[in-house]
Amino acid sequence: MHVSIQISLFHIFFYQIPDQVASFTPSPFISNRPIPHFLKQNELNSYRKSLTPLHLSQISPNNESSVGVVGRGFVFVLASKLAAMAGYNTWMLYPPKELEVIQSVMKIDDDEPLPANLDFVGIGDEQAVGGRLKGTDALILAVDSPDDVLSTELINFLINKETVGSLKRVVILSRNLNGKGMGFFVKAAKFSANSQIWGGDSEKIKMYQDYENSVKSALKKAGSEADVITVRAGTLKGGGCGEDPTYPQYLSKKFYEITKTDIITWNFLFDLKVRGVELSSGDNLPGPGVKAVFTATSSDVCEGDSSRCSVGDAMVKCLSVDSQNDVDFGVKTLESREPPTDDEWNEMLKKVMT
């Protein structure tokens, strides 16, 4: 593996911590039935959707299903842990110098063993990476920073004719790219209050659009029929287990220590209050708009925010749901001290994926 790929993948692995811590073309309609002229636009979209067959590429969580997780930052680590805990044979790429930190934010207790079905594959071990890719059923690509994506060079290394033999699905963490609720106030808040705000200016929007297209293009060139599920987020907040820990499937209290910038970290307060989630089909969720400076580090439910816990769950739980080829959906916050149940997640995902 080229050194440039290693640098591209893991430069400053946890750099999202401030300062010191820091195409597949959609399948054509298969029916010749005429589309009723009386349908309104939203009804027309639903009608068209009903004519498109389900792409039966769901991956059930069992010891025969392999999931690879590639990315940077806390949401990448969280997705790896959640995939393993769901029952998938999970492997994640890691930079050797960061392994201790990664494991510390995964382990709820220092003496707790990590899931036996979670393997850490060093980014420099080209033979191991290549072997894993050839038997991988699904890839999850997740970068925590709103200002960074995986390089095209890395995407082409992960997805090519030699690696896609078993690949059925690719899940991408992207952003809300519709431009709503963005502008001057969001840019000012990002500069002054929270550098991890999703700002959504034209340059960053194009960067993410190119990123999404690079994944689909790589699949097409490789001759793969794997579908692409794009999970859209706004500003990522929280990600940990809570106070007891209440929800040990998420990151440990070490996460709060690392991200702490005050007496009590606002990420901790956020996780205490905002476990609820709502999914929105397509790309239509707005940013914080003129309220951006007030919502930047708020622990309340705010426009433009997404919980890391909910995003991580969405990326993993969508693997086992049938889809209509390539789909995208946004993740927004709802006030609740409890996350959705598995049945509730399944119902929400079915609505945005089928």
Image (tube, rainbow, N blue to C red):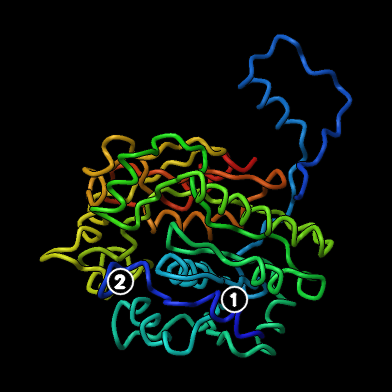
Q: Nearer the viewer, residue 221 or 335?
A: 221
Q: Nearer the viewer, mark 1 or mark 2?
A: 2
- The x and y percentages for residue 339 are 36, 52
| Image side of residue 129 versus residue 301, left or right | right
Marking on residue 225: none
Q: Is residue 86 above or below residue 135?
A: above
> Which residue shows up at 80% across the image and 41% down it?
27
Q: Quadrant of residue 138?
A: bottom right
Q: Amino acid at mark 2?
A: Ala
Q: Nearer the viewer, residue 218 or 66?
A: 218
> Does label 1 or label 2 sit earlier along the sequence?
2
Mark 2 closeness class: few <14, some 14–19, many ≥20 residues within 10 Å:
some
Q: CA distance from mark 1 to mark 2?
A: 31 Å
Q: Nearer the viewer, residue 228 or 191?
A: 191
> Which residue shows up at 75% across the image and 11% down it?
37
Q: Quadrant of residue 300?
A: top left
| Image side of residue 126 versus residue 91, left or right | right
Q: Nearer the viewer, residue 160 or 7?
A: 7
> Which residue shows up at 70% across the image and 74% down it?
157
Residue assigned mark 2:
22
- The x and y percentages for residue 306 are 38, 49
Residue assigned mark 1:
89
Mark 1 closeness class: few <14, some 14–19, many ≥20 residues within 10 Å:
many
Q: Is residue 168 above or below residue 107?
A: above
- The x and y percentages for residue 104 are 34, 82
| Image side of residue 134 versus residue 82, left or right | right
- The x and y percentages for residue 324 are 70, 43
| Disc 2 secondary structure class | loop
